């Protein structure tokens, strides 16, 4: 029995006995006989007879019309032969019945003939609709977007394939060459979806390429030899590639063929966006297929023909294939309507999207007024902070993302002008691709902008886009295969008043699930990559508006804390789009791939920088588990620096995990111990409060390494508090298991202790206080009166958790700080103004740039081992195999611990000594010491001191871990490690040791004495 297709069948059954005019009859009498003659020659005659029998059995079409309907469907409608080859007779019968029902409905209701039919079962679906190629309102586009969202399984997977995850449906789509009837010149598009049934359901490798193992049974049985050859070739490339593989084939009788393969879930809206792309170029598809494979690869095959026969189809298909890679990166954005309305081409609308996001980050209308007010206010820190906040708010309220977007939409002709300028300097296929920037040409563009717009705001917006063009050194925009768009910028576009310290380099990366930056303050620099998530739209808007500033401040802090290691400070941020908060790994992989596009030589990229760059990346919030992949991906892409590309790798890859060995906490705790020693206090008798829980790196190791009486822990799960001190045994148990505070055994709390989970509401504390929201209670507990202890160690929390507007809540009613000793473990937990106020009130506070440098020191020495050891040595001595830790590795960890503790003690003593001598606040001393060391480091590296071979070897020997020296020696280190990096080791060691030993106010002759003593 034929399964019910739609509600239209019921109507058909009610009216099928009525006489139907020829207009709605496919096999009208005047054409019936020729069609029947054609059927005798039809290669699918046998299948047609089967279909007739099925329809006759159901009695849903008058017997007198069955022959005409079937004959018309096979001989006049003009479906591709592959439809009949791949579609069972039962399904064909359903399709004929559905079309007949639509005509009968039109006749019965007197309405215009509309074909919009669909059938859905658990394992299949069919959609039939009108085909209007080249029309924006084509109903087929809405159907394709629906199919894509519901049947392709885009949300099931990331670029890391789980071969056991649910797979998307297979699709066969056909467009008729004939029409519904002589009087109804309507072409149809038919979509038929089926669940794949794989030949081998036990495939466990994402690298498997044998079609006979990963393919659907129906595909394997029916696909042509040519198709299998093409799919096999493209599959062998796709499994080893992060992005799409795109191939096209010249025009044949059934059209030019476009074939695309990519990992399922690695992008979104791609299939429908490809349709929009070829429609823009005045082409339409005769038929197209989507084939799913059990290794996570999906392949599209599209046969294309031009709407206008006179065009060169092979030129068009080549252009479509080129732009298909760009579509993969940003398939659909809020600017897509400019493309659909043919106001902008796809490259232009993609450029417009990037320019929009860039301009939004850096527009600032109030620089002049702000400077005047800041000068008038003077040195009052509270007023200066309030003015800075007011300026930021006014700027963001003026230049909202929506306001910048409106300007882009309103002036597409300016986007075209600026895109042409962009393309002129960065498209390698253009003769002008290697041109240097023309200042006069830039002035002409600016003049055109001013003539075109009618207000100052729009002038500033497009001026910012022009600035983006003029400071862009290289981009992968025109690289044939890419997963994200990446841009290397000269930081000259940054306002010196806004950003006092100019970075060395800025990277901007944009993908379909994210956008982000990478900022470094030296050519040789290292820092972590942070994933930034949002719980709601409000938080996302805040994160989006402050993205660059957060990145800049983190990198700047890193630059300060990296004072005594060779790498300068850097940081990367990946802001997940609001609709893709679950795509962190996808976004990270694309971010890394985009960076590598610009780090590795490629003839497709015009390089106006023309010097080798190496980035050294590390883990940060949300990326600790991705470091192995990034290193391996760099290796797969041919990067010679792959071993050192990331730190924080797993033990088997030669990494030194910070959390496992307590690297970051080891430095922080030296400041706690140093302060207590200066004050003559016993740690075991001191109370402590910490943010960052036992599940985190800093939080868990702070618990393990300390001996204090911890009264409170705030983490992602809530607030854990006991005024008598949390049970140390139970606290260490959850820290040992890296569990959140909510797993603390509440029976171990005293009568006044409590655990308030973020998921709880309307909780009454033992003291009687009523808590309405556990989440809000957690977010602000560090400001709560109960949070009072001898020592406060922030081990987690968002940047600027304590600022000028709430720092007063850290004081008691008599003006005393609730935390006499503060050692800032989490980066940027306090603003600088808040720190100064705390110090002014008597608190001893050490800022993150001093205390939190154990992790960066560990990572630096991890990089050094990767650079100094060849591949075989690294594998033998740094990689843990089968749980066996190499003797060298174990000893090297000891060297790293000693280096971290020594650097922390040296800086602590220097800060304490300078504070006692000059009364300069410690938080300012951190910056002064960092600035002096970094400045002296730069001078040393460019001085003749480097040419003194004896001094060079002595310094390198003193700076490098003893175990590494014993294994390879000084000469091998100098020979193997890149010269800029060795220079950085040399400069950082000399500069830091001199400043730590001699202080900030040492005369120049003191440095001569220092060097002389080293040589002696």
Image (cartoon, grey):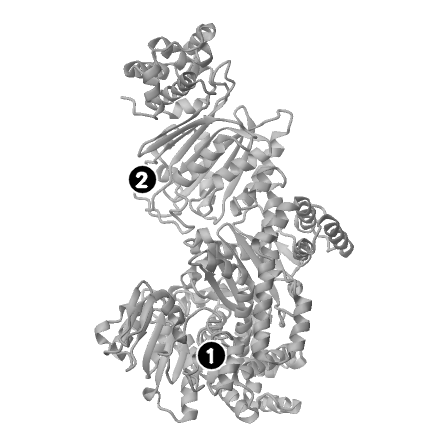
Q: Residues within 10 Å of mark 1 (few under 14, many from 20)?
A: some
Q: Where is residue 301 in the image (x, y as percent from the top left)?
A: 48, 34
Q: How many labels does the image show?
A: 2
* SS of the residue under disc 2: loop
Labels 1 and 2: the sequence-earlier one: 2
Quadrant (top left, top right, bottom left, bottom right) of the C terminus? bottom right
Q: Position of residue 859 (x, y in %)?
A: 47, 71
* SS of the residue under disc 1: helix
Q: How crowded is mark 2: few (under 14 residues within 10 Å), some or many (20 or more)?
A: some
Relative placement, left or right, of 836 versus 770 is: right
Q: As displayed, is residue 124 above or below residue 326?
A: above
- Residue 700 seen in the current view: no
Q: As displayed, is residue 494 above or below residue 236?
A: below
Relative placement, left or right, of 398 versus 650 is: right
Relative placement, left or right, of 321 versus 222 is: right
Q: Nearer the viewer, mark 1 or mark 2?
A: 1
Image mark for residue 808: 1
- Residue 441 seen in the current view: yes
Label 1 to label 2: alpha-carbon separation: 66 Å
Residue bearing the label numbered 2 = 200
Picture quadrant where residue 563 is located: bottom right
Residue drawn at x 41%, y 11% as measured from the top left: 20
Quadrant (top left, top right, bottom left, bottom right) of the N terminus? top left
Q: Where is residue 38 in the image (x, y as percent from the top left)?
A: 45, 10
Picture quadrant where residue 698 is located: bottom left
Q: As displayed, is residue 674 above or below residue 648?
A: below
Residue drawn at x 58%, y 76% as measured from the top left: 383
Residue drawn at x 37%, y 81% as measured from the top left: 788
Q: Where is residue 854 in the image (x, y as percent from the top left)?
A: 45, 77
């Amino acid at each position: 029995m034929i399964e019910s297709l739609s509600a239209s069948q019921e109507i058909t059954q009610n009216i099928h006995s009525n006489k139907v005019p020829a207009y709605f009859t496919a096999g009208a009498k005047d054409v019936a006989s020729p069609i029947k003659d054609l059927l005798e020659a039809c290669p699918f005659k046998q299948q047609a007879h089967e279909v007739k029998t099925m329809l006759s059995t159901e009695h849903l079409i008058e017997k007198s019309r069955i022959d005409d309907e079937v004959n018309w469907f096979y001989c006049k409608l003009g479906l591709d032969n592959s439809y009949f080859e791949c579609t069972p007779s039962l399904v064909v019968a359903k399709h004929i019945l559905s079309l007949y029902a639509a005509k009968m409905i039109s006749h019965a209701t007197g309405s215009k003939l509309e074909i919009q039919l669909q059938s859905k079962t658990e394992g299949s679906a069919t959609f039939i609709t009108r085909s209007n190629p080249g029309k924006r309102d084509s109903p087929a586009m809405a159907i394709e977007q629906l199919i894509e969202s519901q049947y392709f399984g885009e949300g099931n997977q990331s670029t890391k394939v789980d071969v056991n995850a649910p797979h998307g449906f297979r699709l066969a789509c056909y467009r008729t060459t004939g029409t519904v009837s002589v009087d109804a010149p309507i072409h149809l598009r038919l979509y038929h979806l089926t669940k794949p049934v794989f030949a081998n359901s036990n495939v466990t490798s994402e690298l498997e390429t044998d079609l006979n193992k990963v393919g659907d049974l129906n595909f394997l049985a029916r696909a042509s030899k040519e198709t299998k050859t093409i799919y096999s070739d493209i599959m062998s490339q796709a499994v080893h590639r992060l992005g799409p593989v795109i191939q096209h084939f010249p025009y044949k009788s059934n059209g030019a063929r476009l074939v695309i393969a990519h990992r399922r879930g690695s992008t979104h809206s791609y299939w429908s966006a490809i349709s929009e792309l070829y429609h823009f170029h005045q082409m339409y598809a005769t038929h197209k297929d989507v084939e799913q494979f059990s290794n996570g690869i999906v392949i599209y095959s599209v046969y294309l023909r031009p709407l206008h026969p006179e065009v060169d189809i092979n030129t068009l298909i080549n252009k479509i294939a080129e732009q298909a890679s760009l579509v993969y990166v940003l398939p659909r954005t809020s600017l897509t309507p400019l493309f659909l309305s043919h106001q902008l081409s796809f490259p232009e609308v993609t450029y417009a999207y990037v320019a929009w996001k860039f301009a939004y980050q850096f527009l600032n209308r109030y620089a002049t007024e702000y400077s005047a007010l800041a000068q008038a206010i003077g040195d009052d820190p509270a007023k200066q902070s309030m003015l800075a906040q007011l300026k930021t708010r006014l700027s963001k309220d003026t230049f909202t993302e929506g306001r910048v977007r409106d300007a882009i939409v309103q002036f597409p002709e300016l986007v075209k002008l600026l895109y042409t300028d962009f393309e002129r300097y960065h498209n390698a296929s253009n003769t002008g691709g290697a041109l240097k920037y023309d200042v006069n040409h830039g002035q002409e563009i600016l003049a055109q902008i001013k003539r075109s717009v009618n207000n100052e705001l729009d002038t500033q917006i497009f001026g910012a886009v022009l600035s983006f063009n003029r400071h862009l050194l290289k981009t992968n925009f025109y690289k044939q295969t890419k997963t994200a768009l990446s841009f290397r910028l000269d930081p000259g576009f940054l306002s010196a008043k806004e950003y006092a310290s100019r970075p060395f380099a800025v990277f901007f990366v944009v993908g379909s699930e994210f956008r982000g930056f990478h900022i470094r303050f030296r050519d040789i620099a290292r820092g972590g990559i942070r994933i930034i998530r949002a719980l709601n739209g409000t938080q996302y808007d805040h994160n989006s508006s402050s993205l660059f500033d957060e990145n800049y401040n983190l990198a700047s802090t890193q630059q300060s804390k990296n004072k005594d290691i060779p790498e300068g400070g850097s940081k990367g941020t990946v802001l997940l789009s609001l609709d893709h908060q679950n795509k962190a790994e996808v976004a990270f992989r694309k971010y890394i791939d985009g960076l590598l596009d610009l780090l590795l030589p490629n003839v497709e990229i015009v390089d106006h920088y023309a010097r080798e760059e190496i980035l050294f990346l590390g883990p940060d919030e949300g990326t600790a588990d991705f470091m192995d992949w990034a290193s391996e991906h760099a290796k797969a892409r041919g990067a010679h620096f792959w071993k050192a590309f990331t730190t924080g790798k797993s033990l088997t890859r030669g990494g030194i995990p910070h959390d496992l060995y307590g690297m970051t906490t080891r430095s922080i705790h030296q400041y706690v111990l140093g302060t207590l020693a200066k004050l003559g206090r016993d740690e075991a008798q001191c109370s402590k409060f910490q943010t960052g829980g036992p599940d985190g790196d800093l939080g868990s190791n702070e618990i393990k390494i300390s001996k204090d009486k911890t009264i409170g822990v705030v983490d992602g799960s809530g607030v854990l508090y006991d005024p008598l001190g949390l049970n140390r045994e139970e606290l260490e148990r959850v820290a040992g298991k890296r569990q959140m505070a909510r797993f603390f055994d509440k029976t171990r709390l005293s009568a006044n202790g409590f655990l308030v989970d973020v998921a709880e509401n309307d909780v009454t504390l033992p003291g009687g206080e009523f808590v309405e929201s556990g989440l809000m209670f957690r977010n602000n507990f560090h400001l709560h009166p109960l949070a009072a202890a001898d020592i406060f160690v922030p081990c987690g929390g968002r940047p600027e958790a304590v600022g000028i507007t709430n720092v007063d809540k850290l004081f008691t009613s008599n003006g005393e700080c609730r935390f006499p000793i503060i050692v800032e473990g989490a980066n940027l937990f306090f603003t600088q103004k808040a720190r100064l106020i705390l110090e002014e009130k008597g608190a001893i506070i050490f800022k993150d740039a001093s205390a939190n440098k154990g992790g960066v020191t560990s990572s630096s020495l991890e990089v050094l081992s990767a650079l100094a050891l060849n591949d075989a040595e690294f594998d033998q001595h740094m990689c843990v195999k089968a749980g066996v830790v190499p003797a060298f590795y174990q000893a090297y960890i000891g060297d790293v611990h000693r280096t971290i503790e020594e650097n922390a003690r040296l800086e602590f003593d220097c800060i304490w000594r300078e504070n006692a001598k000059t009364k300069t606040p410690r938080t300012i001393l951190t910056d002064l010491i960092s600035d002096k060391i970094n400045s002296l480091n730069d001078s040393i590296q460019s001085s003749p001191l480097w040419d003194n071979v004896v001094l060079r070897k002595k310094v390198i020997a003193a700076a490098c871990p003893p175990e590494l020296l014993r294994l390879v020696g000084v000469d091998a280190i100098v020979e193997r490690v890149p010269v800029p990096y060795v220079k950085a080791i040399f400069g950082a060691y000399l500069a830091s040791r001199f400043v730590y030993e001699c202080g900030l106010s040492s005369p120049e002759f003191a440095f001569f004495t220092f060097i002389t003593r080293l040589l002696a």
